């Protein structure tokens, strides 16, 4: 523990100046200049990074979407993140199916109650539940990819459900990243902002209002799905 504390303290002393508003603004401006100077290469690199992270079934899709909103303007940020989502999720599905099946099954199926819940619901209606799981963002993105492959969801159903349900996540997370970028540029280099003031400034951003509206819709869909599931279950029991 003492070594970790020492390393953490050393890193803070060395790089704490990068955490100031002035530093964040200047670094963001420099990165955006590089992105603007490479209008074709920059989006391809970003999409490729999203595909790689998702494709090897690693966490990080949410943060990468957030970064996309910081680097690119809408609607391009949402479009780039969406492309990365679909291609990466499809690759992850096939990687889990043909390469990592046994490893992921030991990691998820035997130990995870979340996986058992996912499996039970998918077996009733794979397409509808995959859409609900993605759209409401209840399950981690990488988890849905791996679990769907392990459960045996048909790849056509998986791709169709993912293509439909990734739209809200791509829009909401990249929009949140855009809100942070706008907030940085609205502050002066020497501005001192407390947490309450920062929160109200963020809520006043139009991008954040879009995010809150999207989350409201997603939660509404979740409640509708939960309301419909008991009815489906009762109908299935009657047919049996």
Image: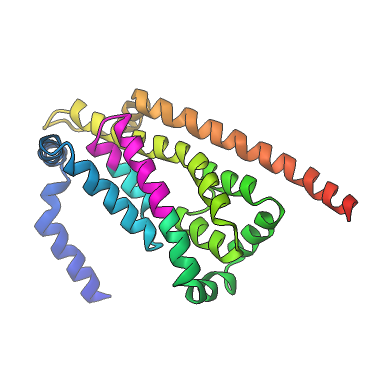
Identified at 62% across, 58% down, the residue is 118
Q: Is residue 239 toward the left or the right of residue 104 in the image?
A: right
Residue 138 higher or lower than 219, as above or below: below
Q: Which residues are magenta?
A: 68-89
Q: Is residue 213 toward the left or the right of residue 39 in the image?
A: right
Q: Quadrant of the C terminus?
A: bottom right
Residue 71 higher or lower than 53, as above or below: above
Residue 173 higher or lower than 15, as above or below: above
Q: Main secondary structure of the magenta part?
A: helix
Here the colouring is rainbow
Identified at 13% across, 39% down, the residue is 38
Q: Is residue 71 magenta?
A: yes
Q: Is residue 204 visible?
A: no
Q: Is residue 161 toward the left or the right of residue 45 in the image?
A: right
Identified at 60% across, 64% down, the residue is 151
Identified at 18% across, 70% down, the residue is 6
Q: Quadrant of the N terminus?
A: bottom left
| Of residues 196 and 207, the one drawn nearer to the viewer in this rendering | 207
Residue 148 horizontal/vertical position (percent): 56, 59
| Of residues 85 and 194, the one drawn nearer to the viewer in this rendering | 85
Q: Is residue 149 visible?
A: yes
Q: Is residue 80 magenta?
A: yes
Q: Residue furthest front?
A: 156
| Of residues 145 and 30, the one drawn nearer to the viewer in this rendering | 145
| Of residues 69 and 236, the one drawn nearer to the viewer in this rendering | 236
Quarter holding residue 136? top right
Residue 12 horizontal/vertical position (percent): 16, 58
Residue 166 horizontal/vertical position (percent): 47, 42
Residue 61 horizontal/vertical position (percent): 37, 51
């Amino acid at each position: 523990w003492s070594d970790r504390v020492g390393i953490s303290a050393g890193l803070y002393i060395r790089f704490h100046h990068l955490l100031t508003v002035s530093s964040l603004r200047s670094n963001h401006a420099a990165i955006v200049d590089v992105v603007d100077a490479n209008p074709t290469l920059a989006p391809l690199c970003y999409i490729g990074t999203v595909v790689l992270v998702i494709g090897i079934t690693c966490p990080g899709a949410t943060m990468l979407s957030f970064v996309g909103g910081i680097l690119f303007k809408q609607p391009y940020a949402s479009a780039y993140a969406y492309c990365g989502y679909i291609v990466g999720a499809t690759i992850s599905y096939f990687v889990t199916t043909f390469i990592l099946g046994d490893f992921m099954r030991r990691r998820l199926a035997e130990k995870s109650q979340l996986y058992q819940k996912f499996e039970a619901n998918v077996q009733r209606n794979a397409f509808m539940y995959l859409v609900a799981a993605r759209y409401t963002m209840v399950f981690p993105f990488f988890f849905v990819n791996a679990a769907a492959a392990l459960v045996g969801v048909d790849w056509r159903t998986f791709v169709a459900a993912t293509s439909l349900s990734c739209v809200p996540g791509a829009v909401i997370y990249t929009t949140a990243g855009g809100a942070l970028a706008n907030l940085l540029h609205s502050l002066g280099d020497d501005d001192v902002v407390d947490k309450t003031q920062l929160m109200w400034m963020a809520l006043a951003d139009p991008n954040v209002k879009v995010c809150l509206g999207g989350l409201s819709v997603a939660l509404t869909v979740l409640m509708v799905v939960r309301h419909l599931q008991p009815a489906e279950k009762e109908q299935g029991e009657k047919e049996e």
